[in-house]
Image (spheres, rainbow, N blue to C red):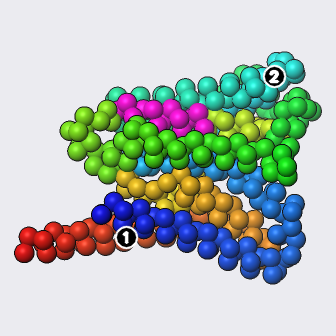
């Protein structure tokens, strides 16, 4: 009964995100009708796709009471890898570049996961450190090779067309994100290993006593998050066509904000990848709408931070309310 109530609660959060999205789009469209044009919607989904990919991976970790602040640096590192591959061989197959980016991201995620799951170092400390380590590797790589920036003319036309292309009017990046979303949502709700992530986040000690391999599951979540960050880096390179060592800087705030705004409890144990993706779409829409509404650019980061604080406060208030009701029910049943 309690689990069904929690599911209803967080599905309600997802519906509230959709409602907020509709309001933002409606208000912005009144100011500028081109915002809801075919090209405007196309650009909106394109811009949200990369953040949504990162948010899916981050959700797997936040559900288990962990976090990865290094995703922006991993994204930048794999984006730079994509450019370097084309500099070495302009005819490198797109599929090989995708695999290389995912593999490098998975290695970075495995490094984080080993320190958290095996060495038992808090995820916040580990990923805050690797945020700078991976970014330093990125700058060091650029300095060692003498390539400070990779431009579109140095990359394969097929690689660039993949990032900017579409199928039936839907951007390729969005289609790929939806496929990843569907796979992650299915695994979390239908695979035993996916459901165990929720158990770990709800009560880590009870999960271990129940025989759940918590360390292995957390390590796997870090690897998957890193792999998705690697994929996001390759897609960023494919879409924007210009890469330097600063790519992905500051993305970690956007990703964490999208996840928490999407209803994934920062205290672990509840939430969905669909909510995280909707959170990414909402924040991207707000960011795109602010200039149209005449809000100065420097307020855009403040809006993301304010949304994060509001969502965390709301989650905390909801959890306290649920805990109070559960205590009242137990007291009533004993009486």
**In the depicted view, which residue is nearer to us: 12 or 246?**
12
* Magenta span main SS: helix
The number of discs equals 2
List x then y, in percent, for residue 218.
40, 36
Q: Which of marks 2 and 1 is nearer the N terminus?
A: 2
**48 drawn magenta:** no
**Residue under pointer 2:** 93
Tell whether 89 sits left or right of 255: right
Calculate the distance from the C-alpha at mark 2 to the C-alpha at mark 1: 49 Å
Residue at point 36%, 62% (across, down): 4
The numbered dot on residue 199 is: none
List x then y, in percent, for residue 84.
77, 25
Residue at point 27%, 49% (across, down): 203
**In the depicted view, which residue is nearer to us: 248 or 232?**
232
Would you call the spot at circle 1 few (<14 residues within 10 Å), some (14-19), or many (20 or more)?
A: some
Above/below status of 191 relative to 281: above
**Residue under pointer 1:** 318
**In the depicted view, which residue is nearer to us: 141 or 274?**
274
Above/below status of 91 relative to 328: above
The residue furthest top is 89
Q: Give the range drawn in magenta.
A: 215-228
């Amino acid at each position: 009964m309690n689990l069904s109530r929690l599911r209803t609660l967080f599905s309600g959060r997802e519906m509230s995100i959709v409602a907020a999205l509709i309001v933002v789009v409606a208000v912005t469209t009144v100011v500028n009708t081109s915002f809801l044009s075919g090209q405007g919607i196309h650009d909106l989904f394109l811009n949200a796709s990369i953040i949504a990919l990162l948010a899916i991976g981050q959700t797997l970790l936040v559900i288990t009471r962990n976090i990865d602040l290094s995703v922006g640096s991993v994204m930048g590192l794999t984006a730079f890898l994509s450019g370097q591959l084309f500099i070495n061989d302009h005819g490198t197959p797109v599929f090989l570049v995708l695999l290389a980016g995912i593999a490098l991201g998975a290695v970075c995620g495995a490094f984080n996961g080993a320190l958290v799951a095996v060495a038992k170092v808090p995820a916040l400390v580990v990923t805050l450190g690797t945020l700078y380590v991976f970014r330093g590797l990125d700058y060091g790589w650029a300095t060692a090779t003498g390539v400070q920036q990779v431009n579109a003319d140095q990359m394969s036309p097929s690689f660039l067309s993949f990032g900017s292309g579409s199928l039936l009017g839907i951007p390729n990046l969005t289609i790929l994100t939806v496929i990843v979303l569907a796979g992650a949502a299915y695994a979390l709700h239908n695979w035993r290993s996916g459901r165990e992530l929720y158990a770990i986040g709800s009560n880590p000690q009870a999960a271990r006593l129940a025989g759940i391999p918590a360390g292995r599951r957390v390590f796997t979540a870090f690897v998957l998050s890193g792999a998705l960050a690697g994929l996001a880096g390759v897609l960023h390179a494919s879409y924007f066509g210009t890469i330097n060592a600063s790519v992905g800087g500051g993305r970690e705030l956007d990703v964490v904000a999208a996840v928490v705004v999407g209803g994934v409890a920062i205290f672990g144990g509840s939430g969905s990848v669909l909510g995280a993706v909707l959170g990414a779409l909402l924040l991207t829409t707000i960011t795109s709408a602010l200039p149209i509404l005449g809000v100065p650019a420097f307020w855009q980061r403040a809006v993301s931070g304010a949304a994060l604080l509001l969502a965390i406060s709301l989650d905390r208030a909801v959890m306290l309310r649920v805990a109070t009701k559960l205590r009242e029910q137990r007291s009533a049943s004993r009486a």
